[in-house]
Amino acid sequence: MKKPIPSAMALAAALLIAAGARAGEAPATPEQRARALTDQLTSDEQFSLLRSYFPAFQKKLPPDAIIGAGYIPGVPRLGLPSLRETDAGMGVANLLNKRVDDVATSLPSALALAASWDLDLAYHGGAMIGAEARAKGFNVLLAGSVNLVRDPRNGRNFEYHGEDALLSGRMAGHAIRGVQSNQILSTVKHYVINDQETGRNVLSAKIGEAALRETDLLAFQLAIEIGKPAAVMCGYNRINGIYACEHDFLLNQVLKGDWGYPGWVQSDWGAVHSAAPAALAGLDHQSGYILDAKPYFGDPLKAAVAAGEVSPERIREMAYRIVRSMYATGLMDRPVPDAPQSIDYAAHAQVSEQAAAAGAVLLKNTGQLLPLAGKLKTIAVIGAHADIGVLSGGGSSQVRPVGGPALEIKPSGFASAFSRITYFPNAPLAALVKRMPGATIRYASGEDAAAAAELARTSDVAIVFAEQWTTEGEDVPNLALPGKQDELIRTVAAANPGTVVVLETGGPVLMPWLDQVGAVLAAWYPGAAGGDAIAAVLTGETDAAGRLPLTFPRGEDQLPRPVIPGLAEKTNAKGEVTYGLAAGLKEFEVDYDIEGADVGYRWFERTGKQPLFPFGYGLSYTSFGYQQLRTGGKDPLTLSFTVKNTGKRAGTDTPQVYMAVPGRDGKPISRLVGWGRVTLKPGESRQVSVKIDPRTVANFDTAARRWQLAPGSYQVVVGRHAGDRVLSAAMRLPKMSILP
């Protein structure tokens, strides 16, 4: 039965509240305004908000729809705008639109941004891509990827912010805050523990509640508290046997109950499996319903209401949550214009370049080979198409770059159906030539290792660019550089010991040639201005300031799961890894209880294994000293210390604070509890103050349903990376019992 249309007077009064104005009263809250408007929605109008179209697959679109990831019709009679959704976290990714002029600015990968450890950069990067989304007519950006890196082979790791909940949650939260500063909506995704692509639609993540609360859920909780995202996107996978988008415990009890999340829960595209069960479990919206077996939140959900399985109040709440987010973000007060607006792509490229340079991590620098000195006469640049551009990651986050791709290659395997290996047109070779006008810089493709070695032998310095393409939909089977790149690097390094390796990768890679080369720079996928960013770091125009947001292992045998679960079942006769459902893959389980809460650097500490490079690691072109660690002030959770630039040039440092916290077995394991980021002139000192979030040092008590911090003396350490100990002190903490 349709809800009766209200009288004109009642409607006018409700719309006054919805507009935030009542005579003689303060402006209404987003909640009051949303409830007033939702009260005026008919039953059909409420249902119209609960599922989105996939515009690229619609034969006929409404006049205000644009090609993108999703379209939710508005209610013009109440001034409720349609929602126009687009991917993703690095930029406005709209590959479904076949127009070649639909371009956008790409930030570096989220891993690169996380490697900066710079919350302000995260905010400004989010603000930049949010501004472009608004200018293009979109009002929902499907950003905010906050899944932890539990497996370094995950094909989507480049979209995420690392292996630590505190770093990941804070960086993603500030990026979301930046997006929504444009009065548009952002998601946070993919809720939760969607941590591998192999069989992502059919796998079940096995993990205990306490471990989940202390890691992946904590990252989401922090991102939500900081960013206040309009929507949470639930993932494809199952958690302990239950699909993420119909998981009552995670959606209703944790997200909406314990955390009091007021926004709406939308599915990932193709992640809905039911009508009434999903709605009752906390799912508010079915995204891109054409990719699901049925339009579950259409007629099937209406039938469930008619049968009494789902109450009309639940439908109203689902619609209300969507409307509330539209008010809370400011979209209702500042609607997105229908006509596209101009975009200052040059200014936005500078934002991207700054982020890419800040996130580049110098892993090795023997004999101060870097920065490249002006006295160099000849430089060899080799490999990875460094003469035309820089590599980007594939999948739904792929941005079509300004100026068009420098190169696109069709990959093999399942990814060929929806991805291209894409290079952005900002070449490191040209950027180096611009910065080093006195040097002769020559290029070799690297396809002929002998020719590359000869070029290196006759050059003062050789720079080998090595690459690893990763994409949504596939995991890499191992951490080795693909093709014959390891052989190329060895051959070049044998010809010239002054060899620099620049890595453009989606995550950690193995380095069997590490002892043979002079320097290594991890540049990740460096984005729209990646060539300039890489050259700026190589030449010392900017300091090498990045620090690893995840651990680089020595080999797959050091990982909790040496073989990717489900990988063998997904490998076809040609040796290609194919997508779960496309390969007819049956359900399987991924055991995350192996490491539990000890993800990444904690796993290495627990097992006593020495990684290739530890979490938080990174070199600088100057040096820093730490002193005067102070604890025990008025606030027992606050500490301070002094950082001094002890070198001869300005530089940026990220001192990290770790605390030893007893694990489930009683053995203390280090946890990151804070960091500082300072840029100092030679000889300059600055005091850094760190406020510890008590949840980072507490354990979650599932019986009491809260965080419990045991009183006592804790060892706190200030160092340059996980496992480093420059300063240490005892820190006495009081007993704390913290709501979940």
Image (spheres, helix red, strand yellow):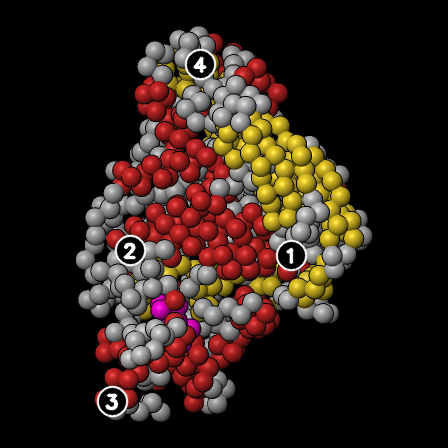
Numbered badge on residue 134: 2
| SS majority, magenta | helix
Name the N-terminal-most of marks 3 and 1: 3
Given contact means CB atoms under 8 Å apart, are the residues at marks 3 and 1 in contact?
no
Mark 3 and mark 4: Cα distance apart in space: 76 Å
**Residue segment shown in magenta:** 320-327
Front residue of 121/298: it is 121
Instruction: Answer with the quarter of the image where residue 405 lies.
Output: top left
Q: From the image, tell me which residue sits under label 4.
A: 373
Left or right? Give the position of 391 relative to 676: left
Residue 603 lies in magenta, yes or no? Answer: no
Residue 194 screen position, x and y as percent: 54, 56
Mark 1 and mark 4: Cα distance apart in space: 46 Å
Q: From the image, tell me which residue sits under label 1.
A: 695
Mark 3 and mark 1: Cα distance apart in space: 50 Å
Residue 321 lies in magenta, yes or no? Answer: yes
Circle 4 — which element? loop
Near mark 4 (Cα within 10 A), the count class, few <14, some 14-19 or many ≥20, is some
Circle 3 — which element? helix
Near mark 2 (Cα within 10 A), the count class, few <14, some 14-19 or many ≥20, is many
Left or right? Give the position of 201 relative to 593: left
Between circles 1 and 4, the one closer to the viewer is 1
Name the N-terminal-most of marks 3 and 4: 3
Circle 1 — which element? helix
Numbered badge on residue 108: none
Given contact means CB atoms under 8 Å apart, are the residues at marks 4 and 2 in contact?
no
Numbered badge on residue 9: 3
Near mark 3 (Cα within 10 A), the count class, few <14, some 14-19 or many ≥20, is few
